[in-house]
Image (cartoon, coloured by chain):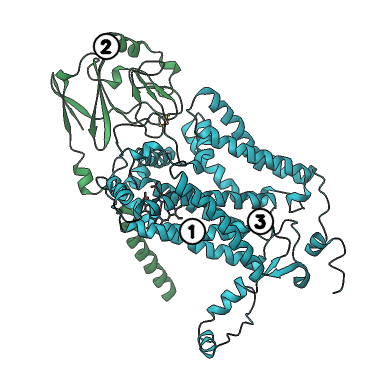
Chain colours: A green, B cyan
Amino acid sequence: MLFIATGAAAAVGAGAVAWPLINQMNPDASSIAAGAAVEVDLSAIKEGQIVTIKWRGNPIFVRHRTKKEIEDAQNANLGEMRDPQTDAARVKKPEWLVLIGVCTHLGCIPQGHDGQYDGWLCHCHGSVYDTSGRIRQGPAPRNLEVPAYTFLSDTKLSVG
Amino acid sequence: MSGPSTFVPKSALGRWFESRLPVMGLVHSSFVAYPTPRNLNYWWTFGAILSFMLGAQIITGVVLAMHYTPHVDMAFNSVESIMRDVNWGWFLRYAHANGASMFFIAVYVHMLRGLYYGSYKAPREVLWILGVIIYLLMMATGFMGYVLPWGQMSFWGAKVITNLFSAIPFVGDTITTWLWGGYSVDNPTLNRFFSLHYLLPFMIAGVVILHVWALHVVGQNNPDGVEVKNVEKDTVPFTPYATIKDSFAVVVFLILYAWFIFFTPNFLGEADNYIMANPLVTPPHIVPEWYYLPFYAILRAVPNKLLGVCALFGAILILAFLPWLDTSRVRSGKYRPAFKVFFWLFVLCALGLGYLGAQPPDDGPVLAARILSLYYFGFFLVILPLLGLFETPKTPPASIADAVLGKGASGANH
Ligand code: HEM
Ligand code: FES
């Protein structure tokens, strides 16, 4: 009885101490606060241009897509994709593509206007993304992620 | 560490102390009287070289830490100030950075020695596995150390390697966020890496003690792979024989080490690491430190993320299973004609993977890396198990004395 009670108390105690030791490594209050939304002025971004801003330590791509880029993205064959998604599901306005610029393979920043689909090419291990940021070739498992964003006006975007 | 010590200190003070804490007797039985096989060659000096390098890394590291600042805004500049302002700072940093490379050169020689002479076979399985643990800890230490100067390669190396964990199904992203302490590699990451980079070498030192303990329980293997049968005839005492031979080898190794430090200190490094870390720019061609390149090539050879990461870790962990994968009755490669061929092919394969790991991920190098990765795994999973069944080994000598002094020496009377 005494053994069981002591053992149980020790197990609960060890768990109660282990959790703070593990959890202290998670993002602290200041890192979470630093994740507040950032604003982007869209009027400065010309058609065909990609602008990179920083949010939560990561690059965000804001791409002002050309007609051709939009058409390519919309007409692509979903059947040949690893992570099939329509272009419409990835944008709010077709001319504005907003993405987290982190390769879903191992985290490098893909190079814009590059690769077979003229979307992005990640030079680290050769992942190819199309003009919708969808993975088309290479080792990355998923499409480039779309962050939460809203259009504050026609020329103002808020990311985060 | 082999049986009760018969050591009796000469001075009265020594005897007084020894009867209270028999540490001198422990050192005497482990490093003075300890019997070492008389047929050991110079490949057996790398254990001493490794111990020396661990000491060198700890000493240079502790003094570097007196001048280094683990903060994203200051780390890069503090390392530059070590190079320019701190008295002898350039020397200490080059000694530490090249010391890591020398440490890995030594550990690779040491491991290949074990592989060739069958040092992992019974009764040395635990000894071998402790070695694999040391190797893993070294890889973690070297990786986190390389992040500290906070250059471009530091940052992007850290990003890619920590992202390996994001391949774990379901909990991968939670784990990477936990490792980073944020949403990307950032100040919290640098801070914890510094803390762990300071800690791990002392954990290595602890495992080294277990490793040497295990070694002294089962005894050293030797080039002929036959166990010691007669301590008188088959062995010589550690001191002076092994002590002087090991010291000589350390000195020769130091010449190579010094050559790197003084003549080509950045040869093994990457120029990009002299550019301060920029989370918004990935260098066009990122490569890890040379000692990780074979595993990096294996990672890139697999077109699927999760499987690639499994192959990378599998390539290292498979070493721990080596004692049970090799089915041959004969221990030393010296008496295994077919094994020898496959062993040297394995060495070439590892070097080839290392070369390919540094190439851009184009079709040619990736295809070559696929072929070599198949050989790498095939060597452990197919060749070694089958070889023991099909190979006709030569007959090893009956004893170490026979091997050194010719047949019949073990029976001859002195
Ligand atoms: C197992 C032994 C060790 C290995 C393999 C190792 C490896 C490394 C490596 C590869 C670097 C990067 C060097 C560069 O490119 O600048 C580094 C940096 C550093 N290490 Fe270690 N290290 C070891 C032990 C230690 C210890 C015990 C300390 C004690 C605090 C330490 C403190 C540092 C510091 C402060 C730096 C940053 C300064 C610099 O970059 O030169 N290291 N280490
Ligand atoms: S990180 Fe982009 S392909 Fe590996």
Total numbered labels: 3
Question: Where ligand 2 lies, by image quadrant?
Answer: top left
Question: Gap between marks 1 and 2, in whole Å?
Answer: 58 Å
> In which quadrant of the rendered view does residue B373 lie?
top right
> In which quadrant of the rendered view does residue B238 lie?
bottom right
For the point 47% across and 61% down, which residue is it? Answer: B55
- Classify residue B39 as left or right of residue B128: right
Q: Chain of mark 3?
A: B
For the point 62% across and 80% down, which residue is it? Answer: B5
Q: Is mark 2 within 8 Å of ligand 2?
A: no
Q: Chain of mark 2?
A: A
The amino acid marked with disc number 1 is Leu
The amino acid marked with disc number 3 is Tyr
Marking on residue B54: 1
The amino acid marked with disc number 2 is Thr
In this view of the protein, which residue sits in the foreground, B389 or B251? B251
Q: Of the residues tagged 1 and 2, which is closer to the observer?
A: 1
Question: Gap between marks 3 and 2, in whole Å?
Answer: 67 Å
- Earlier-in-chain disc, 1 versus 3: 3
In this view of the protein, which residue sits in the foreground, A70 or B200? B200
| Disc 2, SS | loop
Q: Which residue is mark 2?
A: A66
Q: Which residue is mark 3?
A: B42
- Residue B156 % position (x, y): 37, 37
